[in-house]
Amino acid sequence: MVASSQRLRVAVVGCTGYIGTQCVDLLAAHPDVELTTLLGRSWAGRRFSAALPGSGVDLVVEDGLHVAGADVVFAALPHTVAATHAQDWLDSGAVVIDTSADFRLTDPQAYERWYGSAHPTPGLLERAVYGLVEFERDRLRGTDLIAVPGCYPTAALLASVPALRAGLVEPRVIVDAKSGVSGAGRSPSRTAHFAEVNESVRAYGVGGHRHAGEMLVHMQTSTPDDVSLTFVPHLVPMTRGILATVYLQPRSGIAPDTVQSCYREFCEAQTFLRYDEAPPPTKSVLGSNVAAVNCTAQGGTVVVTVAIDNLVKGAAGQGVQAMNVRFGLPESAGLPTVSPWP
């Protein structure tokens, strides 16, 4: 618990990528946070406002990965980098909130299978708590290492776990998800090049996207049955947003209305979930930490759609939400809930 007169001293490491800049933007406006340190190699020596046009944050970006005097470290770094330095940050007394995939899986062998390399610090994996607040709120209150979920898994798990946990649907899950280009990060690449992406939609990772491992682990913990998962991500020509369309089969004797009621009740109990009467568009959650949910029956199949902003509820905002829970702050502190329209 943080005293009402004391603000959390927060550092952001990797502050100039898309997730890092979103972390800085949210934390700078947080009433209980003092941004003290910004680290980022490519913009070192320059003010943060130069890296993010329009920003009012004028802290000078520092080089390196050393943090001192912070209560919280937000790490927005490439995979394996945070894992290599997390112990030092923890030893300094900071709570570490990692937005990469370094601590989302607790099994080192599963990590190596999905990410293609051995985990740098396997001893820390079981110490981390998965930061999907809607399912892990109680565990987050006592942890000092938080693994922010991936953007696709956030949407897919919110769409599937409530019904799986309630035993209402068969353990066969199909996830069709579409993401804006910012999910590919800020560094230039051919796959995110305007001429390659504009006026085109494509599926990728069909043979096995690494987020499938994260989804499957957390779906499996919600039911005693073996879960089968089919996950197909798509890249669409927009900047922000994820729309996950998830197909579930109600168990014998379970009416679709019962599944729908499950999602309504689940959303009503959560700060950042909104149940919509129709499948939500991504624009309705743009820039907010809200996940919009709809559950509709089509014949014998229940179709659950979830829309999130991939950089907010799918990354930085979810990290701030987890931080709020960890330190006993209002869960909504510093987090936007309203999107501009149109």
Image (tube, helix red, strand yellow):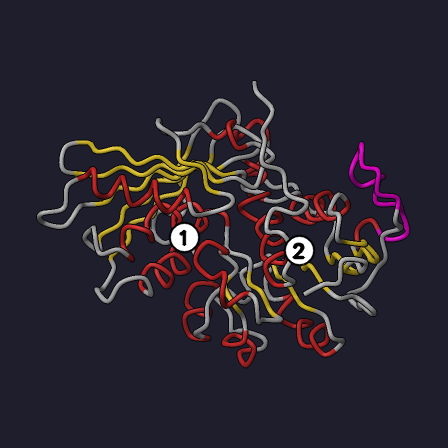
Spatial CA span between label 2 and label 1: 21 Å
The residue that disc 1 covers is 209
The residue that disc 2 covers is 76
The residue under the point 65% across, 72% down is 84
- Amino acid beneath label 1: His
Q: Position of residue 150 (x, y in %)?
A: 50, 53
- SS of the residue under disc 1: loop
Instruction: Tell me which corner region of the image, top left, top right, bottom left or bottom right, holds residue 99.
Output: bottom right
- Amino acid beneath label 2: Ala
User: Looking at the image, which is closer to me, 314 or 101?
Assistant: 314
- 142 sits left or right of 12 in the view: left
Q: Which is nearer the N-term, disc 2 or disc 1? A: 2
The residue under the point 41% across, 34% down is 202
The residue under the point 72% across, 76% down is 88
Position of 210 relative to 307 (above/below): below
Mark toward the viewer: 2 or 1: 2
Q: Which residues are magenta?
A: 44-58
Report the magenta stretch's main SS: loop
Crowd rating for badge 1 (residues with CA inside 10 Å; few <14, some 14–19, many 20+): some
